[in-house]
Image: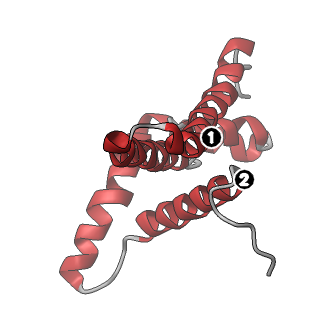
């Protein structure tokens, strides 16, 4: 049986991603203030806001990967029934090695054998692009289209 996590630890795993999302939304909303800045720093501020959004979204998406010790893995352990959560929680001590294998070693092996094995990077990239587009639409930086 899984040990019950302390309430503060459970709260940390839900507040941390929410805090990162708040930073991303603030950076996206910052684009609306660019018109009030002196012309000589507009490009610098815009590039920094763009980089803040991209960097934080990539880190947030990566951190939500459902593998312990990442927050996504801990959230998955908390949401799954015990018969699935227990084996997943036991992977925590091997989590970083699994991540290195999935993100670095597997794509390198694939490039040597002629196979594209960088599926984790593609998943993270696709999710990142979707989240950035959604945030830019929600903050009024991209038009919301139907279809």
Say whether residue 15 is left or right of residue 120.
right
Residue 144 visible (yes or no): yes
Residue depicted at x 45% and y 69%: 122
Distance Cα–Cα, label 2 vs label 1: 9 Å
For label 2, the crowd category at 10 Å Cα-Cα, with few meaning under 14, some 14 to 19 and many 20 or more, is: some
Q: Where does the image place residue 132, in percent across and percent down from the top left?
A: 57, 56
Task: Name the one closer to the observer, 99 or 44.
Answer: 44
Residue depicted at x 31% and y 66%: 106
Residue that carries the numbered disc 1 in the rendered image: 25
Which quarter of the image is occupied by the N terminus?
A: top right
Residue depicted at x 31% and y 84%: 115
Question: First in sequence: mark 2 or mark 1?
Answer: 1
Task: Name the one closer to the observer, 101 or 54.
Answer: 54
Name above or below for residue 58 compared with residue 129: above
Which quarter of the image is occupied by the C terminus?
A: bottom right
Say whether residue 138 is left or right of residue 31.
right
Task: Name the one closer to the observer, 73 or 122.
Answer: 122
For label 1, the crowd category at 10 Å Cα-Cα, with few meaning under 14, some 14 to 19 and many 20 or more, is: some
Q: Secondary structure at mark 1?
A: helix
Say whether residue 147 is left or right of residue 101.
right
Q: Secondary structure at mark 2?
A: helix
Q: Quadrant of residue 133?
A: bottom right
CB of mark 2 within 8 Å of CB of mark 1? yes
Residue that carries the numbered disc 2 in the rendered image: 138
Q: Where does the image place residue 64, in percent across and percent down from the top left?
A: 58, 45
Residue depicted at x 45% and y 64%: 120
Task: Name the one closer to the observer, 32 or 7.
Answer: 32
């Amino acid at each position: 049986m899984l040990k019950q996590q302390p309430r503060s630890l459970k709260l940390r795993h839900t507040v941390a991603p929410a805090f990162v999302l708040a930073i991303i939304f603030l950076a996206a909303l910052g684009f609306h203030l660019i018109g009030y800045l002196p012309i000589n720093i507009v490009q610098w501020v815009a590039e920094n806001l763009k980089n803040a959004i991209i960097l934080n979204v990539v880190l947030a998406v990566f951190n939500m990967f459902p593998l312990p010790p990442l927050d996504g893995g801990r959230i998955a352990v908390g949401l799954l029934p015990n018969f699935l959560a227990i084996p997943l929680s036991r992977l925590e001590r091997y989590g970083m090695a699994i991540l290195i294998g999935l993100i670095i070693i597997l794509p390198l092996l694939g490039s040597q054998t002629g196979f594209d094995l960088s599926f984790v990077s593609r998943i993270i990239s696709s999710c990142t692009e979707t989240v950035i587009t959604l945030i830019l639409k929600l903050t009024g930086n991209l038009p919301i289209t139907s279809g």
